[in-house]
Amino acid sequence: MEHVDCGDVKGGSAKDIEYSLRGVDFPAEKPALIQHAMEHSANKVVMDRLDKIEDRVYESIVDVTTQVGKAA
């Protein structure tokens, strides 16, 4: 499946974040998540949201999306 850039304001939904982080091996640190998302063509909104999460180890994609929601 090819990534489609969601350039609209909804581009940072949990689904978009999950898509950009598909294939990440958890647990994973914030820098690894950001690097993975960049390598998988995450849009600016997703990257901005990941940039705002706490700098810590994440145990799962649910852990990431929960933190994104808190940081928004």
Image (spheres, rainbow, N blue to C red):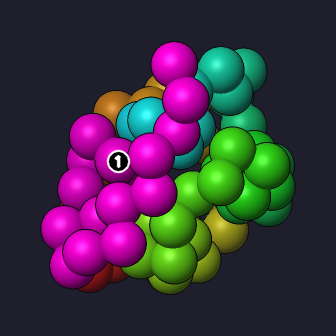
Q: Which residues are magenta?
A: 1-17
Residue 27 vs 36, above or below: the answer is above
Residue 43 vs residue 69: left or right? right
The majority secondary structure of the magenta stretch comes to loop
- Which corner quadrant of the image does residue 71 belong to? bottom left
Q: Nearer the viewer, residue 11 or 24?
A: 11
Helix, strand or loop at mark 1: helix
Q: Residue at x 52, y 39 (%)?
A: 3
Which residue is denoted by mark 1 in the rendering?
16
- Which residue sits at x=27%, y=40%? 15
**31 left or right of 42 in image:** right
Q: Position of residue 44 (x, y in %)?
A: 51, 77
Residue 53 visible, this orientation? no
In magenta segment, residue 10: yes
Coordinates of residue 69 in the picture (x, y in percent): 23, 64
Residue 30 in the figure: left or right of residue 69: right
Q: Nearer the viewer, residue 39 or 64?
A: 39
Q: Is residue 36 visible?
A: yes
Dividing the picture into quadrants, the one containing residue 22 is top right
Q: Let me know if residue 38 is in the magenta part.
A: no
Name the one closer to the observer, 39 or 6.
Answer: 6
Identify the residue at image location x=51%, y=19%.
1
Foreground pick, 7 / 38: 7
Seen in the picture, residue 58 relative to 60 is either above or below; the reply is: below
Q: Residue 11: image x %, image y %? A: 30, 65
Which percent across, then down, holds residue 61? 44, 32
Question: Taking 52 as reference, is 27 above or below it?
Answer: above
Q: At label 1, which amino acid type do we have? A: Asp
